[in-house]
Image (cartoon, helix red, strand yellow):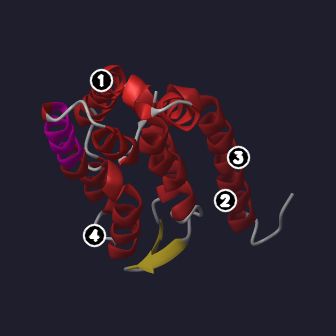
Amino acid sequence: MKRIAQILLRKAPADGFVRTLNPLLIRSLRTVYEYWLKEEDPLAWLARIADGSPGVREKGQMILHDISHRCLREYLKELEQASAQNGSSEILQRLLALPATSRSSAPIRRMPHHFPGTGKRFQRGGEAHLLKNWKILALFKIMEMEGCHDIHEEILREINYTLVQLIRQGAAGADGGVSR
């Protein structure tokens, strides 16, 4: 919807269609934000899986901040203010500055690539433990999100690739570093 509005703005004077386009954009954006507010807050999910890993939590907060529930509520407030003043081209410009569907899923799409993707071993009390694979957790979280269905095929390929890498690392570790 935003793309159509941007094309219309370039091709025609805004005065002719702003009164019709603004409510349509407001409704479209509201639908997007309300959908994402029904999903688990990405920052809450991150806090739950991070297990006290400050590096993972900090990096994830940077990536996911714009689609956190707090930000989405702020976007909804901006929409409410815009809908009260709905008929101007200035409001149209404000609406076009707000993130839309594709921009909402972009941080989610990038999220797995910012987390360590390898299962590294560490020693604790004489036992070897495998660190969580943050990347695979993020990929499976994306698969749970219905609103990301348009990227599920891409995510499945990335899950497959990541699992193959983990299996290879596990085999290399079990064989004393010999890869097959």
Mark 2–mark 3 Cα distance, whole angstroms, equals 14 Å
Give whichever of discs 2 and 3 has the lower sequence position. Answer: 3
Which of the image's four quarters has the C terminus? bottom right
Mark 3–mark 1 Cα distance, whole angstroms, equals 49 Å
Instruction: Name the residue tied to disc 2.
Output: 170
| Disc 2 residue crowd, few under 14, some 14–19, many 20+, Cα 10 Å | some
Q: Of circles 2 and 4, which is in front?
A: 4
* Location of residue 39 in the rendering, given as x and y in whole percent from the top left corner: 28, 34
Give whichever of discs 2 and 1 has the lower sequence position. Answer: 1
**Amino acid type of disc 4?**
Gly
**Residue 75 covered by magenta stretch:** yes
For the residue labelled by badge 2, is the local secondary structure a helix, a strand or a loop? helix
**Residue at image point 53% right, 63% down:** 114
**Amino acid type of disc 1?**
Arg
Can the viewer see residue 110 in this picture?
Answer: yes
Mark 2–mark 4 Cα distance, whole angstroms, equals 25 Å
* Location of residue 96 in the rendering, given as x and y in whole percent from the top left corner: 40, 42
Mark 2–mark 1 Cα distance, whole angstroms, equals 61 Å
Tags 1 and 4 touching, CB below 8 Å: no
Tags 2 and 4 touching, CB below 8 Å: no
**Amino acid type of disc 2?**
Gly
**Residue at image point 56% right, 33% down:** 7
